[in-house]
Image (cartoon, grey):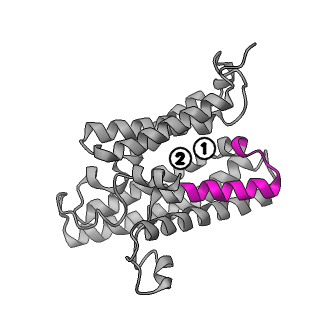
Amino acid sequence: MAEVAELADAHDSKSCGGNTMGVRFPPSALRKMMILSIILKFLAIVGFLYLSWRRMGEGYDEARVVAFSWIALLSFFIGGRLAYGLIHWGVWNDSWLSWGAILDKPGISYGGAYVGFLVGAGIVCLKNEWRYWSFLEDNVFVLLSFLLVWWGSQMMGESAVGVAPMLAVGSSGVPAAGVSLVSSLLMGKKYRSLVWYKSGKKGFLFFWANVVFWLVYLLIMFLFNKAGSGCYPVLVLVLISGGGLFMLGEVLRKE
């Protein structure tokens, strides 16, 4: 799954760094945009911690939710760094400490980061005896909001150093996360009334958000000629998410 998710990334946070097709800003504006990008990343992390506690504190033990939030962030970044280092083997050969030097030696695979998040959430759910799909559904809005701000800050930082907006890391992720977030908010209170979703089980929004995200991601790849061989892994992710939704909803169950 990690390999499939990684292949779906049109770009990574290092490979785009040398592109100069975008607008060049004067040094003063460049510094301001880079500072703003860092501030937005900080706000994304703080916002994730706050929203996770705010939205999930009522249905779960607050102390455990806080612990989950930190574990989720940690597993997100660990998964992203490990996947990036393994895929681009040799990029940090100078020292093992380089694997954790995010500021000095940037590079993260968002496919690996997402898988890391899912693994972290699974460990927490197993330890606390929480229902995995139900818990992921409760976390959909928090995670998508985090990704939306984080990728937005990434695009701003890369645009400041000359990367064309449509070549930046979040160029596909930002609109995909935005559409997925809005569609999930609209479906939040309606999905149990859907005739074809027979089980009515929680977890629908998690799979729904993934289906919408990867469909929009795929559409953007085609619209801006970014598809190539990268469209096949994204299509696989659409099918996996749709299959999960299909099975969770017990669509073929006989009444």
- Left or right? Give the position of 207 relative to 155: right
Q: Which residue is mark 1?
A: 140
- State the image quarter where residue 95 is shown: bottom left
- Please name whichever residue, 125 or 54, is drawn nearer the observer in this view of the structure: 125
Magenta region includes residue 28: no
Q: Which residues are magenta?
A: 115-134
Q: Residue at x 72, y 58 (%)?
A: 123
Q: Residues within 10 Å of mark 2 (few under 14, many from 20)?
A: many
Compared with residue 25, is residue 237 higher up or lower down, i.e. above or below? above
User: Horizontal and vertical percent for residue 96?
Assistant: 49, 84
Are discs 2 and 1 less than 8 Å apart at CB? yes
Magenta region includes residue 132: yes
Determine whether the residue tagged by mark 2 lies in a helix, strand or loop.
helix
Q: Residue at x 79, y 45 (%)?
A: 59
User: Horizontal and vertical percent for residue 28?
Assistant: 24, 71
- State the image quarter where residue 63 is shown: bottom right
Compared with residue 96, is residue 83 higher up or lower down, i.e. above or below? above
- Left or right? Give the position of 232 relative to 26: right
Q: Which residue is mark 2?
A: 144
Q: Amino acid at mark 1?
A: Val
- Left or right? Give the position of 241 relative to 168: right
Residue furthest bottom in the image:
94
Compared with residue 3, is residue 14 higher up or lower down, i.e. above or below? below
Main secondary structure found in the magenta portion: helix
Q: Amino acid at mark 2?
A: Leu
- Please name whichever residue, 207 or 139, is drawn nearer the observer in this view of the structure: 207
